[in-house]
Amino acid sequence: MPQTMTSADLRIRNQVRLLRAVHDAAEPFTRAEAARLLGIGRNTAAALVGELEQARLLHEVPAESSGRGRPTTLLVPHPEGPQVFAVDFREDTWTLAAVELGGAATELETGEHDRTPAAFTEIRAAVARHESERLAVVGFATSGPIRDGHRLHISHLGWDEVELDTLLADWPTTVIDNDARLAGLAESRRGVLRGMGTAMHFHIDFDIGGTLLLAGDAQRGGHNIAGEFGHMPLTGSTLECMCGVRGCWSLDVGANALVRRFGKEPGYGTGRELAQEILRRAEAGDKEAAAALDDNAAALGKGLGALANALDPEAISLSGLGVELIRLRRNLIEDACREQLMAFRRDDPPQILAGTVGSAGPLTGAAEIAWDAILTHDWLRERL
């Protein structure tokens, strides 16, 4: 039989709900608005706020004056409260940031790495340089799938089944996930997909990865490796991918595909710079660059249409290079997507949207999973 909830359990539950509401809100709100949002009385809301202020979790600050009467106060994170660190580990660089409740981020360090697992030692040293008693959890975004939450695979770096438990053995409490999935999580909580029931997000960098989002949560699959849409044969390519499969969508979409189509050798050290140069040339009217851009955009749209047939998203958002592809070739992407849709779907295709979180998507998503690990009943009981 289910256990009866005690008054202490109910108080903790409402405190967690209030902290989550403050974290998720687009802007600060008042105690009265908190009461309405949580469906509780104003006196109860006042008591919750007082307890969380005493625990250095929330703080009240005066709102801008709107005339006579008692000044309104807003609920904000406590300036001495917990924070998380977020790491964005790219194929050739890394970024470390500190993130407050509510999502405000401060970049701490960035660096390049030698594309070997030794990079984790370098990033751990950076974490140690900034670590304080305020640090609660580290969220880590990495550019490859993580099988069962423990074994990292990044085919284009030659990483095969790297044991994360070993790499993270001396780290503070750390949660880790795939960068494309975390970019989608960021858009669903902080960006253009906020409030969507069923959506998809694709992060395009050297290649393309994505995630299916249901009610704001990124789907992970049975082994935590769902979302490798870039390794599906969606566009008819005959090239062999470094993942071991022939014809992957990733071979036709992203910076490496753009560089390859332009007749240059793709690579993870210079690929971004070459891709940006091709985009600039295409925008200036260079025919060869424009053709490379057209192929990339058409392949992107074709793959999106095929996935829309299967998963029926309300909207699809793009980040990274995808934002530039939308800006320069929106019509081509949308037309290619519509052509790939089943006939009965073509009158109402999913929206294709430029992400609004920007290049910080994986870092923002890493912070979100770190806060998810904190904002729990057990953690709050220990804190109080």
Image (cartoon, rainbow, N blue to C red):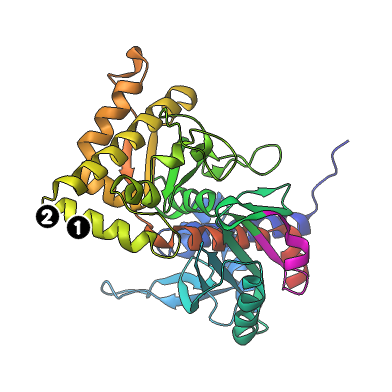
For numbered disc 2, what is the local secondary structure? loop
Q: Where are the magenta residues, as a range?
A: 160-175
Q: Nearer the viewer, residue 264 or 318?
A: 264
Residue 40 drawn at (x, y percent): 58, 52
How busy is the neighbourhood of tag 1: few (under 14 within 10 Å), some, or many (20 plus)? some
In three-dimensional space, the C-alpha distance between marks 2 and 1, rounded to whole angstroms, equals 6 Å
Q: Residue at x 61, y 87 (%)?
A: 129
Residue 316: horizontal and vertical position, in percent?
Answer: 39, 38
Hey, which residue is sitting farthest right in the picture? 1
The quarter of the picture where the N terminus appears is top right
Residue sitting at x 78%, y 70%: 169
Q: Is residue 32 left or right of residue 178?
A: left
Residue 200 seen in the figure = no
Residue 300 is labelled as: none
Q: Secondary structure at mark 1?
A: helix
Question: For mark 1, what is the residue?
Answer: 280
The picture quadrant where one finds residue 55 is bottom right
Task: State the residue in front, 298 or 262.
Answer: 262
- 151 relative position to 53: left or right: right
x then y, percent, for residue 85: 58, 72
Q: Which residue bears the numbered disc 2?
A: 284
Q: Amino acid at mark 2?
A: Ala
Determine if the magenta segment contains residue 363: no
The answer to whether the residue labelled 2 contacts the one labelled 1, judged by CB atoms less than 8 Å apart, is: yes
Asked where in the image residue 26 lies, by quadrant, the reply is: bottom left
Q: Position of residue 39 (x, y in %)?
A: 55, 49
Q: Is residue 5 above or below residue 116?
A: above
Quarter of the image with the C terminus in it:
bottom right
